[in-house]
Amino acid sequence: MTARPSSLITLATCNLNQWALDFDGNVQRILESCRQAKERGASYRLGPELEICGYGCEDHFLENDTFDHCWESLAQLLEEGATDGLMCDFGMPVLHAGVRYNCRVICHNRKVLQIRPKTAMADNGNYREGRYFTAYSTPANSSANLPEKHLLPTTFFAQFGQRDVPFGLYHLHCADGTTIGCESCEELWTPHASHIDLALRGVEIIGNGSGSHHELRKLSTRMELIISATRKCGGVYLYSNQRGCDGSRTYYDGCAMIVVNGRIVAQAPQFDVHDVNVITATIDLEDVRSYRASHPAFGIQAARMATEEGGAGTNGLMCDDVRLVFDPFNVASFNKNRPKITEESMALKIVAPEEECCLGPACWLWDYLRRSGAAGFFLPLSGGADSSSVAGIVAVMCILVTKAARADPEGDVAKDCRRVCRQDQGNSLWVPSTPQEMANFVLHTTYMGTENSSNVTNSRAKRLGDAIGSYHLSIKIDLMVKAVLQVFQITTGHLPRYASRGGTMTEDLALQNIQARLRMVTAYLMAQLLPWVRGRSGFLLVLGSANVDEGLRGYMTKYDCSSADLNPIGAISKGDLKRMLIFLSKEYPDFDVLAEIANAPPTAELRPIDAATATAEAGHSQTDEEDMGMSYEELGYFGRLRKISRCGPVSMFKKLMVTWSHLAPSEVAAKVKRFFYYYSVNRHKMTTITPAYHAEGYSPDDNRFDLRQFLYNTRWTRQFAVIDDIVAQYPEADNDKDKND
């Protein structure tokens, strides 16, 4: 009897921390992922979307140089043996027949087997793929028997003897019976996802190279789509993603995964400081064939598709010299690093939102810090929840980096740590002994008080700085405030007063803004000179600490401490930040002051303290929510309805009449009007907002995410008139509310 051919295969996918336009660095990270895949016995390796150039090239995709450099990088990968004995699914842009496409390029043994263009562009939120690429449609006369061809650069013929390659929506039939297809990022999210037709055509292995960024509470949705893709259709689904800051506001959150028939068999970390994470799994393809054959409905639809397309396999490209399965009885196939087959399903690893809030921004800050060449961060630390959240995030960054550096003192993380801390001279293998030691090198915090500041917040800032290990200072800026006021008085003959001391609200607001803006000036002075003061080289990046709700409401002074180089919490809500502070205080007992900060009423401390109304918790009589005229919880409702639910004033009012049914319609109307007034009158502040880590779906970031005008008719005459008409229809509701009160 003839032995049955083997159906065992080892597959690899990865998280890669690519950097837009860093072609040399990107190639090295890709090579490392291929090396690790081979080391574990894999015969197929999947990489992230546009991994060769980096996903975030944006308008650089409009430059032909970007495409040329990608072909140079692909040739380098082939020349250096990345595909020797390993089928590699690379992501890169391709200019085909004068049209730019976002493509998967599949190679094996220094030969390009296929270029597969993306069919659905991601154009929502932070994504602008339609600006750079065209969604591909298959020509009417194209088939696997007569495929559309792409002419390769002439260097490929000179180096590898190949002139052209099939271009289109094909899958691969290998000599050992293995079938492999591609799905690309956004296609998974479409109503008629590509993997459905691939499965019905008999494709057993589907690779999805993605460029999906982190957003709070998004991972479970993404992962459920991946799991359901094979639970319904059967098959092996590999997901690869970029992970890290590739040069912009977004953080790609990895979480590469291998799923078999709806079972998770391997999952990579979502947040990490390493540049390369490779996961592998050994799979018996007979499990896929058996799973599909046991579902009659699948067989009916697959047979119908084969009939409609004129026979099974019409979209398959034959690869007669490619074999991917291994024979377990062949000594030559033995690999001690090859993962074992498992019939068990891993539990999906998803961290809680409060942990996401610190891990994502911490990793994003590390990437920015090490790639910018800066010597660390400067943070104005007020002792309030927002700036303390930023300090906590940097502390988590130091914890992650210190742990990785100490685990491998010769590794890339340790090398970056030594370079950032300016401890890279000579052959030293120095690594920080504790996260606090690293924090003392990279984090500089300063409490900038005035006569309006309280001892309570000063104490909290100092205790937090001590716990984290930052280089902390406490200063008074009253001399600067008085100097500015004296210049104004000499110039105009007038001296403004606070409202509590007989001044107008115009004077009061101006006096508050002077303090806020002088803190920004002081922050940049400190950031430039503190390394010099400490006898060190380099500069510091200034960190901002305005949360998403304050940005939405415009509750910030333009060009105050909300103006900085980076803001890790600019798209995180106040509620999430407080939950993060509580989490950190429990996770790291040394940070117990964070719980105290989280429970304190937020205050700007820009007005004189009124001893009669000041509370012990706040330490001050001025509170944020009283100043804003709305609560942070209400701002969360307004933000989600405005952006995520796409509501104008009238639609928002109608929804909140139901949600806030305990309030009279006139009260709901007043709250909605107040929000839209302040949102529109302060919208101009978003045009100069500090680049912030993108984390929340209702971020008001004007630069990339929330594209709206910044000059409004703040009276909203038509919209508010319609709301008033609706309120007038419910006089009984207002009367009933008055009686209950």
Image (tube, helix red, strand yellow):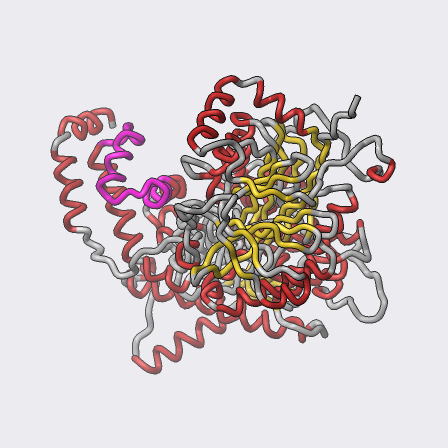
Q: Quadrant of the N terminus?
A: top right
Residue at 54% from the left image edge and 18% from the top image edge: 295
Who is closer to the viewer here, 437 or 239? 239
Q: Is residue 130 visible?
A: yes
Q: Is residue 612 part of the magenta span, yes or no?
A: no
| Quadrant of residue 50 within the rendered picture | bottom right
| Quadrant of residue 73 within the rendered picture | bottom right
Who is closer to the viewer here, 411 or 500? 411
Q: Is residue 651 part of the magenta span, yes or no?
A: yes
Residue at 84% from the left image edge and 34% from the top image edge: 330
| Quadrant of residue 506 within the rendered picture | bottom left
Q: Is residue 613 visible?
A: no
Residue at 68% from the left image edge and 53% from the top image edge: 275
The secondary structure making up most of the magenta span is helix
Residue 349 locus on image (x, y percent): 62, 34
721 vs 458, left or right, is left
Residue 19 locus on image (x, y percent): 59, 60
Please determine whether, in this image, residue 482 is positioned above or below residue 693.
below
Residue 39 locus on image (x, y percent): 79, 46
Furthest-right residue in this view = 331
Who is closer to the viewer here, 446 or 675? 675
188 vs 5, left or right, is left
Furthest-bottom residue in this view = 491
559 vs 263, left or right, is left
Residues drawn in magenta: 637-664
Q: Quadrant of the C terminus?
A: top left
Residue 570 locus on image (x, y percent): 47, 53
